[in-house]
Amino acid sequence: MAQDTSPLFLGLDLSTQALKASLLDINLNGIDEALVRFDVDLPMYETCGGILPQGHALLDEPDAAASPAMMYLAAMDKLWDRVKHERRWPIERIAAISAAGQQHASVYLAEGATHKLQQVRSDMPLANQLDTTFFSRATVPNWQDATTLQECDELMAAADKAFDEPSPALCRVTGSIAHTRFTAAQILRWRRARPDEYAHTQTIALVSNFVATLLTAGRDVVMAPIDQSDACGMNLYDMRQRAWSKELLAFVAGGAEHAADLEAKLGVVATDPRHIVARAGTWFQERYGVSPDCLVCQATGDNPATLQCLTPLFGEAVLSLGTSDTILLPSRDYAPDVHFHTFEHPASSHSHDKETTPPYFQMFVYKNGSLAREWVRDTYCHGTWTEFNEAMHASPTPSHGTGFYWRRPEIIPWNASGVHRFAPDGQRLEEFAEPTYNAAAMVQSQAMSFKTRIGHVLTKANVPLERVYVVGGAAENQALCQVLANVLHCPIARPLIQGRSAETGERVPYNYCSVGAAFRARWVWECAAKEHTEVSFEACVAQARGEAGAVTYTVIATPQEDIATTFDAYVDTWTAWEKAAQTA
Ligand code: XUL
């Protein structure tokens, strides 16, 4: 039998806890997945949940949330060893690679880093030859870090002063207000605390372009640019100009005269997602047999990569129900808002594909997701989901009023806190007469918040919400999904992102972010092959998958019309109570 030589596509995902890899064929079917778990597979780096425990000697300050930078090199070594020697992937067939990385987190490379990456020997692992002097900062601050509150206040004030825009100017310019995890505040705090380390920094990368850079290690190494979508998570990128903001660079760098230096450290932002960084590095060619023709494509953040994987159209949303609840919503307009983040769509080049690929997406992050649901379950439903679900089922409409369960200070609405209950006539209640009603009130209220925020964005464009893809733990809860369908008044679908496990031969769920990265690799490869023919990302994915279409999904709940119309009519009342609860 002739040997299969058809091209394969690789997506990597360097997340908080693991480095994952998905290998797909030309039709985007999953061939295999592999991963390296930091805590388990690389115990010498002493991480817990992928980050250093509080007080660890490597941390800049005891309560910072950060990972050892060296660990990322060791993870890369281990992953490639694993897929070559244990999983025996046909590496030579990989035609293109892209990656996803945890958003906001930054990697600091010391002067001489490019030269060091150029000189790597293929008979040695990266971590054995790029010692700690490769990095100017020993750690990679993680998105969970919250040490930079003070810097956030300063950034907001500096932006209000620098821009002739209504306050908060930072939000209008960068698409988000200041956040502790965003890169600007992180760089600012570290530059002040460790001026020597900052001065000896050649490159400040995000995790995504750091991975892309590593993939070019060897003779022809290239410092991969920062991806446009990921750049939006930095509070440094002027989304209106689609360029670094000189004013914000100046503030973070410590004066206008230092802005150019910081800009040089950050490098350029790739504004075309089809940009090819380079061919796979000679270190990968010689050590693992990667083809010299293999493309290294732009890498992006993990949330943008999820969007690439699920390819929601304009009028569709992705709802991730996890510890926190997150909504990703493609958007046609640049309409930043203090309550959410606006990012460049990872697959939009703002040109040919505007109709199919909206240029932006909004990201809404709620802190009180699963933890709040679990609190209601434990406090009012004897700790069982069965009772919780029955309560949702018994009260499909807000017949006994509503509630707000901001157990932790909420992001949407900003800083709202406490538990608040309202009777149907708007009177405040200490408790509901039937304790289990809290479950119905809470899920309906969470869903009303999603409805009003999504509505705010889509109504402006006069587009109805057509479908919501749910992912995350709570997406398995059928009763909860039925509430979502009724409140959001649209079908709720569960995406089926699956592939084969080479180990067992069975079909298993795949990781959205690395699959999304592999989709990007497939698209860039196709665009490169077709040269002058414009192919939109969505069209490429849909064509590649043939009959399977863009995303395979199962509709798990559809709205019950009479109930759904009750919630449509409930928007103004609920909104007024939400406001009242905030000011309580
Ligand atoms: C998004 C965020 C997290 C990380 C997870 O703003 O901080 O979702 O991207 O890696």
Image (spheres, rainbow, N blue to C red):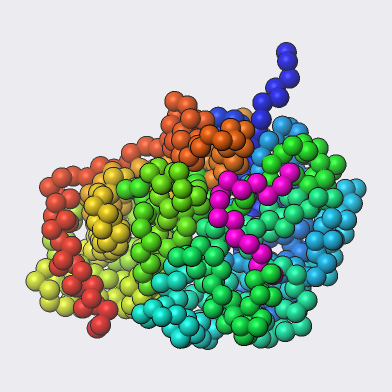
Q: Is residue 233 visible?
A: no
Place residue 388 in its image quadrant.
bottom left
- Left-right relation of 441 to 25: left
Q: Nearer the viewer, residue 193 or 578?
A: 193
- Number of labels in the image equals 0
Question: Looking at the picture, does residue 48 appear above or below residue 465?
Answer: below
Examine the structure image and report whether residue 277 is included in the region drawn in magenta. yes
Examine the structure image and report whether residue 185 is included in the region drawn in magenta. no
- The quadrant of the picture occupied by the C terminus is bottom left
Question: Looking at the picture, does residue 253 appear above or below residue 216?
Answer: below
The residue that appears at 58% across and 46% down in the rendered structure is 274
Q: Nearer the viewer, residue 297 or 530?
A: 530
Residue 254 position, x and y percent, is: 63, 85
Residue 548 position, x and y percent, is: 45, 29
- The quadrant of the picture occupied by the N terminus is top right
Question: Looking at the picture, does residue 235 appear above or below residue 92?
Answer: below
- Left-right relation of 459 to 325: left
Residue 11 position, x and y percent, is: 62, 44
The residue that appears at 66% across and 86% down in the rendered structure is 192
Question: Looking at the picture, does residue 154 appear above or below residue 96?
Answer: below
The residue that appears at 88% across and 56% down in the rendered structure is 119
Q: Nearer the viewer, residue 445 or 288?
A: 288
Q: Which residues are magenta?
A: 265-279
The residue that appears at 30% across and 59% down in the rendered structure is 457
Q: Is residue 489 visible?
A: yes
Q: Residue furthest front?
A: 532
Residue 276 position, x and y percent, is: 65, 46
Place residue 416 in its image quadrant.
bottom left
Q: Residue furthest left?
A: 425
